[in-house]
Image (spheres, rainbow, N blue to C red):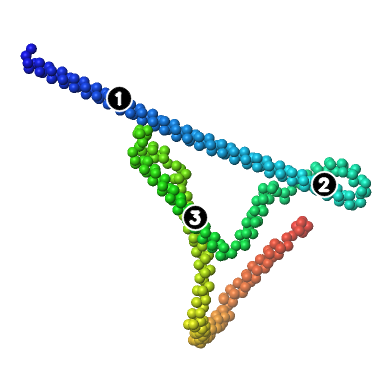
Amino acid sequence: MPEGETESSAAADEAKAAEEAAAEAAEAAAEAQAAAEAEEAAAAEEADRILAEKVAAERAKAKAAEKEKIEERASESDLRMEAAIAHANAMAERRSHKSSEESAGNGAPPAAAPSEAPAAAPTPPESSDVIVDVDLATPGAAKFMDTLSDVGSRVGGLGSDDVSDGMYELSRRCGSTMKSSLIAFKEHALDIAIAATSDPPPDQQQVGAVRRAYNKAEMAKLGQLPMALLFAIFTLFCTVAFAVIHFPKKYAPALLHKAKAKAIEYKVYDGAKAAASRLKLASTSAYHSASEAAAPHLAKGMEKAAELYEKTSSTIASSPVASAALEKSLVATSQVRARIAAELLKLKDPPRSGDQLA
């Protein structure tokens, strides 16, 4: 075989071997990538399973706590009901004893008292019927009403200084709570940001940044931000209440005293009185001048009205047509008035049945 053909066949073999090696490397890389994706999917499924187990455990714990609360409330209601029944029985016995004592005091012989004691046993139904009244309250309701009355009496005894000092103290406490909530939220948010941006540990190489941040987050600490906002609102409200109560009471009397002193010093009251008197004199003089100026015109107007009335009356008296029309209008007016009066009398005194038959 010639030397050139030998070299070409060797190069072809080398190229074929290189292609096969490249194909094998590609297959190995694809297998490695598939294995990595499978491991990542398995890790994600494991994280989801752990999270679901945590959520299920929290829900079970919450359900158990709620069940315990319901049982405690039921036991408390049962105890209250038993206490109310015992109270009602005690009241029934007390009233039955009182009624027996009253009957014995009304003239019954003392020897018959022991024999009447067994006979008084069937009286509880009657006394139980009497006991059912709305004034009886359970011990819990009585305790609640006593507490409300106590709180009302204590609040009524507070003065404005006490309220202002209390508002200041509340604003200070709410402010400190707001600061602590903000610090807790800031530290937790920094931890979440560090967990999301830093390199994952060796056992969490397949977990994404969002998943790591989610696993790091705690709702209790994230909820500190809205709590801080709420406490900020309370702080502002208490501060405004303190300012509204404290500063007017502290500075208003001094300012009022200074204003009165300045008013006396600059004779403000005397100036106001002088201005009022001058205004009164000016209005009186203006009224007199206006009435004096309008008096001649008013007199002339009255004279002209009288002349016009005399002319009109003389014209009507001298004209027969006008006199007849006036008489007819007067007659028609009197007839209408009479009809109206008759109808009104009918409405006031309707005719009786005997008159209608007649």
Residue plotted at (61% across, 74% down): 327
Of residues 138 and 33, which is closer to you in this image?
A: 33
Residue 335, quarter of the rendered image: bottom right
User: Taking the image as drawn, is residue 98 in sight?
Assistant: yes
Query: In the visual, does 355 lie left or right of 266?
Result: right
Percent of width and height locating residue 315: 55, 80
Q: Nearer the viewer, mark 2 or mark 3?
A: 3
Residue 12, quarter of the rendered image: top left
Residue type at mark 3: give it. Cys
Residue at the spot of label 3: 174
Please tell me whether residue 168 is drawn above or below residue 206 in the rendered image. Answer: below
Numbered disc 3: secondary structure: helix
Residue at the spot of label 2: 96
Query: In the visual, does 45 lie left or right of 347?
Result: left
**How many neighbours does mark 3 have within 10 angstroms: few (below 14), some (14-19), or many (20 or more)?**
many
- Label 2, label 1: how far apart the Cα atoms are: 96 Å
The image's mark for residue 31 is 1
- Label 2, label 3: how far apart the Cα atoms are: 58 Å
Residue type at mark 2: give it. Ser
Contact, mark 2 vs mark 1 (Cβ under 8 Å): no
**How many neighbours does mark 2 have within 10 angstroms: few (below 14), some (14-19), or many (20 or more)?**
some
